Amino acid sequence: MGNCFSDVPGGRAAIGGTARGLLNAIDAPNDAVDNFLRSRGYHGLFSQIELSFSASGLRDRDVLSKIDPMMVLYTRGKHGALEEIGHTEVVLNSLDPKWITKHLIMYRFEVVQFLVFRVYDIDTQFHNLDVKMLKLEEQQFLGEATYALSEIIIKSDRSLASELHREDPIRSMHSQNCRKLLVHAEECVGSKTTVEMIFRCSDLENRDLFSKSDPFLIISKLVEGGTHIPICKTEVIKNDLSPQWKPVFLNIQQVGGKDNPLILECYNFNTNGKHDLIGKVQESLALLEKLHASGQGGTLFLPTGGGHNSHNKVLKSRVYLDKFSESVQYSFLDYLWVLN
């Protein structure tokens, strides 16, 4: 369900969480893994790839609400056997989920690696259960896609959209089109620097009728082609127009560099999954560091209109950095070298 602090039952899977713990197995490229592979003869023939996932147009199979999708990632072995690599968090009430959880894959250039992506609708009764405890045979299967990791890598924008298919229960020899899964790949460049940030907003516009907004932040990075890749979410703070969220942690590798553009979006949480955009701003880690040093906030804006008539409405709302600190996380090999 992801790391999160939402006070809304079941909403913990949908929004909430910091960047810490959202990568599968390791938070960043691992020196110990690199050296181990090199000791086995893989000199320059491997690379660590971070995969991000989103889907669009999933079939709505729930009666009173939208589906609550989760994706499970597998590798296909030599004899066709599937081995689970990991899974995403559950996103509540969404036909177009953008999962925050990333997965790291060791890409070996001389080996064809087939990946299988399966999407499930998680039943409401299991929302408060750790995703590791879920029995997939008890969940509704929405569809799957299969392709080689190299198919993603060779794309100019490192992204590949694929149709999700599921067996037709009536005509088992045919498959049904269940819309698309988008997978984005980025090569991991090792960075041991982690940034801890505490965000605060002021004068947020109210989006609820009978109470104040329930705001949370989504932080995304911009990649080639202008695509937004979510990398971090905060928890939900209920009934607060001047919220301060718990610390979030970002590895420089996740962001791509201190000068890479980041999109900060503040939303009002709704249990139906249709979260209202309160405001957004484009910054970078370098600019956020300057905002913290100056004590000044960044001004939020709202995109309005569309096409040639689109423009940004500047708001009174502001986002502040109450903390911005960098720390270096050493690997096990670093400690061995120090000891020697």
Image: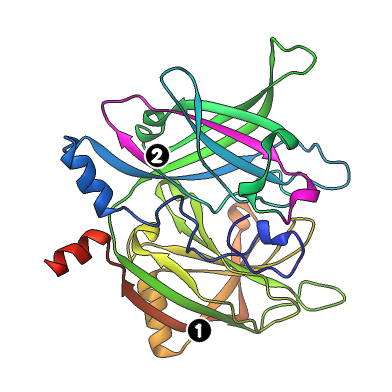
Residue drawn where x is 76% and y is 44% of the image: 67
* Circle 1 residue: 297
Determine if the magenta segment contains residue 210. no
Q: Where's residue 190, x and y in %?
A: 27, 56
| Marks 2, 1: nearer the viewer | 2
Identify the mark nearer the N-term, 2 or 1. 2
Say few, some or many: other residues with alpha carbon within 10 Å of mark 1 (under 14 / 14 to 19 / 20 or more): some
Q: Could you say whether the residue bearing mark 2 is in a helix, strand or loop?
A: loop
Whether residue 57 is visible here, answered yes or no, is: no
Given the image, on which type of amino acid does mark 1 rest? Gly
Q: Residue furthest bottom?
A: 295
Camera-nearest residue between 321 and 306? 321
Camera-nearest residue between 64 and 36? 36
Name above or below for residue 172 compared with residue 336: above
Whether residue 202 is visible here, answered yes or no, is: yes
- 28 on left or right of 10: left
Query: What span is in magenta?
Result: 105-128
* Quadrant of image for the C terminus: bottom left
Q: Residue furthest front?
A: 339
Camera-nearest residue between 312 and 333? 333
- 96 on left or right of 38: right
Residue drawn where x is 87% and y is 76% of the image: 210
* Quadrant of image for the N terminus: bottom right
Q: Where's residue 180, x and y in %?
A: 61, 33
